[in-house]
Amino acid sequence: MQKLEQIYEGKAKKVFKTDDPNLFIVDYKDDATAFNGLKKGTISGKGVINNQMTNRFMAKLEKAGVPTHFVEELSERETLVKKVSIVPLEVIIRNISAGSFAKRYGVEEGIVFDQPTIEFSYKNDELGDPLLNTAHALALKLATPEEIDTIKKYAFAVNDFLKDFWAKCGVTLVDFKLEFGRLVDGTIVLADEISPDTCRLWDSKTHEKLDKDRFRRDLGGVEDAYEEVMRRMMGAI
Ligand code: TMP
Ligand code: ASP
């Protein structure tokens, strides 16, 4: 598989064309940003961890009935994926109050919900990824009603899988963000990444934060936290 020209560079990953028009290569960086790129830094070794963690989860989710863009891990930082056009929605599932939910509704972090919540943001950096509901997404023609139904179904299935998996590692899955894409034939598949960049992961006993909030909130020990969750994941896989 030949890595051809770069077609996109995001905050944490680069995407390259390959000699197969239906396949892309994703290359994970150590760059970290927060607050829509306002805060910038590096988390050493993050790209390797996020690549390997994402791929292991995608392979498992595929078996659990959630189609994904994952094809094959090529190196520590590079993965072959199916070409998708990303649905411009950030899909956020929450099991416990934290982050923008706690802030927006004026509640403390750590309230365990009876049912997981789902919310969408419009993936648009210029607008600061504004929150929107299903009717707004339909009005803006970001997705069809059928696609939204499929995305919701898959997002909750991912939550069921990840919550159980992390529990076995002594980790509580607080919330996470997913992105979906359309294959060339229109099929909706899970894309992007599942990593400590995109999930809130708390130690089940101590509630210590083991995710990117350590970077966002200047808590220190960022690299150690990423290594710790990766180590625990590898022990359970
Ligand atoms: P929030 O509480 O800041 O809305 O974040 C909810 C979840 O989404 C959390 O696990 C972090 C993740 N997330 C991203 O992956 N990318 C983002 O740009 C933001 C704002 C959150
Ligand atoms: N990566 C996102 C940004 O820079 C935010 C985050 O993950 O907190 O905007």
Image (cartoon, rainbow, N blue to C red):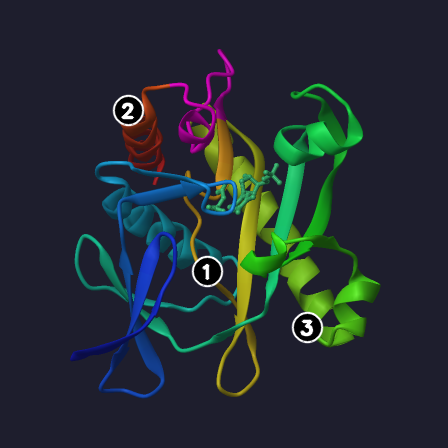
Dot 3: within a 10 Å radius of its alpha carbon, few (fewer than 14), some, or many (20 or more) residues?
some
Quarter of the rendered image showing ligand 1: top right
Q: Which residue is mark 1?
A: 63
Give the percent coordinates (x, y) of residue 67.
50, 67
Q: Which residue appears at 60% of the width and 52% of the height?
A: 128
Instruction: Answer whether residue 220 is magenta in the image.
Output: no
- Element under disc 2: helix
Label annotation for residue 142 = 3
Q: Which residue is mark 2?
A: 224
How many angstroms separate mark 1 from mark 2 (CA)? Answer: 30 Å
Dot 2: within a 10 Å radius of its alpha carbon, few (fewer than 14), some, or many (20 or more) residues?
some
Rendered-image quadrant of the C terminus: top left
Residue in front for this viewpoint, 227 or 171: 227
Magenta part of the chain: 202-219
Foreground tag (1 vs 2): 2
Can residue 65 be seen in this snapshot?
no
Residue in front for this viewpoint, 32 or 62: 32
Rendered-image quadrant of the N terminus: bottom left
